[in-house]
Image (tube, coloured by chain):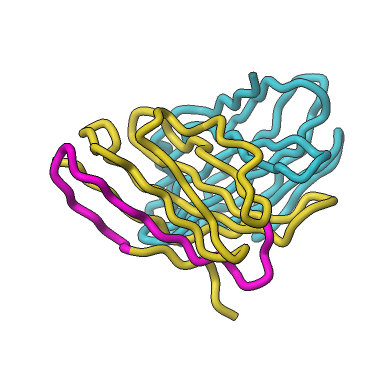
Amino acid sequence: GAGVSQSPSNKVTEKGKDVELRCDPISGHTALYWYRQSLGQGLEFLIYFQGNSAPDKSGLPSDRFSAERTGGSVSTLTIQRTQQEDSAVYLCASSPGQGKYNEQFFGPGTRLTVL
Amino acid sequence: GDSVTQMEGPVTLSEEAFLTINCTYTATGYPSLFWYVQYPGEGLQLLLKATKADDKGSNKGFEATYRKETTSFHLEKGSVQVSDSAVYFCALTHSGGSNYKLTFGKGTLLTVNP
């Protein structure tokens, strides 16, 4: 079946512009995670969704970052007034849901470059 | 807070050499431990995992044992292949509840030469 998909695969933007990154999780997966992969910081957790709610937003680096999830499926990560330090690969992962540990399946990522 | 420290790369080996990538962690309680692999141009994939002390995770010839006494989860393979060239990430998560966010090490780039 289809895996986690993300779009766009690459995004180049100018400093100060807003960007939206999209994640389509595996159908039926109730848990969704966003991570950021950058040269300086490695792989960092950003936000966790269970269904449409986000009980853990502790990794969002500033109030310029926000995310939502609708219909328990697609999620959008929005970065407002982008800065050069936002340049990174943004990864989305989904997993089946609650209870015992469920493997996270990762998408290919969106490479964001802020000029 | 939780943290994972893994050996700095890059690591360059010849085919059929023995591989060890060290990983140690700091965490409260009893985390689950993982190795993820990122092949060139591909997304992150789970390589192996261990959920309790003394468990051994294994896959594709790779092994790692959860050592609580040394807070370690070192990755080993007896004979590497060129196709093993990738970035390897050690990670942990806490069991319980529904939030299984991963805490990653910084990654180790492995290059295997023929």
Q: Nearer the viewer, residue B17 or A62?
A: A62
Residue at figure coordinates x 74%, y 57% from the top left: A97
- Assess whether residue A9 is covered by the magenta stretch: yes
Left or right: residue B9 compared with residue A96: left
**Residue B61 seen in this snapshot:** no
Q: Residue at x 49, y 58 (%)?
A: A75
Q: Nearer the viewer, residue B47 or A56?
A: A56
Q: Where B51 falls versus B31 (above or below)?
A: below
What colour is chain A?
yellow
Q: Position of residue B24 (x, y in %)?
A: 65, 25
Instruction: Pinpoint residue A61: horizontal percent, then vertical percent.
Output: 42, 29
Q: Is residue A60 visible?
A: yes
Report if residue B77 lies within the magenta region. Answer: no
Q: Name which residue lies at 76% across and 48% down.
A: B57
Residue range of the region highlighted in magenta in the rendering: A8-30
| Residue lying at the far bottom of the rendered structure | A1
Color of chain B here? cyan
**Residue A72 occupies quadrant:** bottom right
Q: Position of residue A74 (x, y in %)?
A: 51, 64
Question: Which residue does the image show at 66% across and 55% down from the upper left?
Answer: A31
Instruction: Tell me where residue B42 appears, x and y as whole percent.
Output: 42, 61
